[in-house]
Image (cartoon, rainbow, N blue to C red):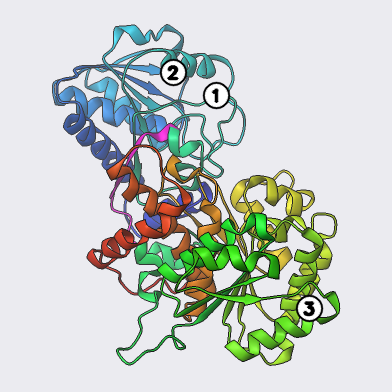
Amino acid sequence: MIELLTPNEMQLADRLTIDSGIDGYALMQRAGEAVSQTIVAQWPDTKIVAVLCGTGSNGGDGYITARLLKVAGYQVTCFTAGRSAPQSYSERAQRDYVADEGVIMPLETFKADEFQLIIDALLGTGLTRNVEGKIAACIDEVNSCNKPVCAIDLPSGVSGKSGQPMGIAVKADLTVTFFRKKPGHVLQPGRALCGVIRLCDIGIEAEVLEQIKPILFESWPNLWGALLPDHNPDSNKFRRGHVAVFCGNVWSTGAARLSATGAARSGAGLVTVVAPENALTVLASHLTSIMIEPLGNDTEKLDTDVLSFFKRRKVKAAVLGPGFGDQERAKRLVYTVLQSKTEDSDLKTLVLDADAITAFKDHPLVLFAAIEKSGLQLVITPHEGEFQRLFGNFVKGKDKVEQAREAARLSHSIVIYKGADTVIAAPDGRAVINGNGNVLLATAGSGDVLTGIIASFCAQGMPVFAAACAAVWMHAETAECFEELSPAGMMAEDISQMLLKVWARLREMATPSPSPST
């Protein structure tokens, strides 16, 4: 279930289901059943429960959950934020709960210390304004207590669209949601506020997605796994693609070596580090199977030398920027590589990172125009600071997904907006949020390895958007593998080695045909 539905798309899924003949109150009952069953399984010995109910559908789910928990032997008290809309499903759920002798108290009287478990059904996923007043005070009470909290659909106060707290938000231990996750479940800090997420079936058929046509996904192998490079037994190193990694000066060769190693471990048949002459000795002392190509400092010959190398060695993908240092030289090389498409070379993809991004901070539109004209496939991999330097003036007021989408559209590139909730976006609006990985990735050089993995997959013929998604997921999964060995101490050098474990994990996973939108 890789599709992510915005709050508006989820409302459409509900409406399409109701239009197909399924009663809306039946959907609400199924939601309440899913929550109550999850709670009974999770907290079988926790019997004194508070259910905090809002006035909308989320509150209706809470009343049904409360009624079912009463039947299961729990001592339940509902606290209401106000009257539900007349003739609404929420009002009907409230009436049914009261008819079963359910207790309802004003929200202002809620005291967390009187309960063993708190169920949050105050606000749904469609929140568009900051939480204030008695609901904000109640959320503060919940967050201040040391009691387990189960949120229905999404912790109250978290935006279902952006994952951002709207003033204040509940911090849940468990979140039960329905049909498909929302962006707020996987974007930070929403993902952390959800705790463990349980996705439950309430009878909405997957066919509704054909009408909704979502273009936002959570990255998992069943999205891109069938597109991973699969070489024939008679394949050779040339068919497996050649990756070139541009290197900075002698004091900053490490980043290029990390990128090159990542490319090799990801299956590229040939990897070459292209470096200035003063860095060749250092590189030669560290690299064995990865080749080295000298590139002089003569600016008059720079274009000719690079284009000649690309043609002569049939380079399919290139990496430029990690640890490069000289931003003016980086800028010149970017222009040179962008020209290579018109020079009848085999190059198809250029991955820009670090200094190759920052080099254009004062002239981003010039870069975007050059990319559009080049005909090359570009992948741009900024972290927060780099992203804002290049795209910040164009994306103000947007959430992270929309920022990445706008950046991809403007730059005619696949944009990988890195972070704990990395977003990969394409110029046509498709976007993927990556949800695996852990804090071990927050180590110097981690992003350099990622650039090599991306370039490697592209050089092997993988579609560029799928290559970006797969590379980000596999890169993040290395941290999951390392954490099994140690909770700390991962270095960027470890990532390429951990790719061996990730490949083994992928072999164990089923990888159905990719989504048509990938």
- Residue that appears at 63% across and 59% down: 322
Which of labels 1 and 3 is toward the front? 3
- Residue that appears at 45% across and 47% down: 491
Q: Which residue is mark 2?
A: 143
Can you give x and y, in whole percent of width and height, for residue 449 in the image? 51, 59
For mark 2, does the 10 Å Cα neighbourhood hold few (<14), some (14 to 19), or many (20 or more) residues? some
Q: Nearer the viewer, residue 108 or 87?
A: 108
For mark 3, does the 10 Å Cα neighbourhood hold few (<14), some (14 to 19), or many (20 or more) residues? some
From this viewpoint, is residue 86 visible? yes
Can you give x and y, in whole percent of width and height, for residue 103 in the image? 29, 14
Decide whether residue 203 is among the magenta residues: yes
- Marks 1 and 3, how far apart in space? 55 Å
Q: Nearer the viewer, residue 427 or 37?
A: 427
Query: How many circles with numbers are drawn on the protein?
Result: 3
Question: Which amino acid, by three-letter code, is at mark 2?
Answer: Asn
Which of labels 3 and 2 is toward the front? 3
Vertical comparison of 175 with 467: above or below? above
- Dot 1 or dot 3, earlier in sequence: 1
Vertical comparison of 281 with 189: above or below? below
- Marks 1 and 2, how far apart in space? 10 Å
Callout 1: SS: loop
Can you give x and y, in whole percent of width and height, for residue 364 in the image? 80, 60
Question: Which amino acid, by three-letter code, is at mark 3?
Answer: Leu
- Dot 1 or dot 2, earlier in sequence: 2
The residue segment tinted magenta is: 193-206
Residue 26's disc number: none
Q: Which residue is mark 3?
A: 302
Vertical comparison of 312 with 356: above or below? below
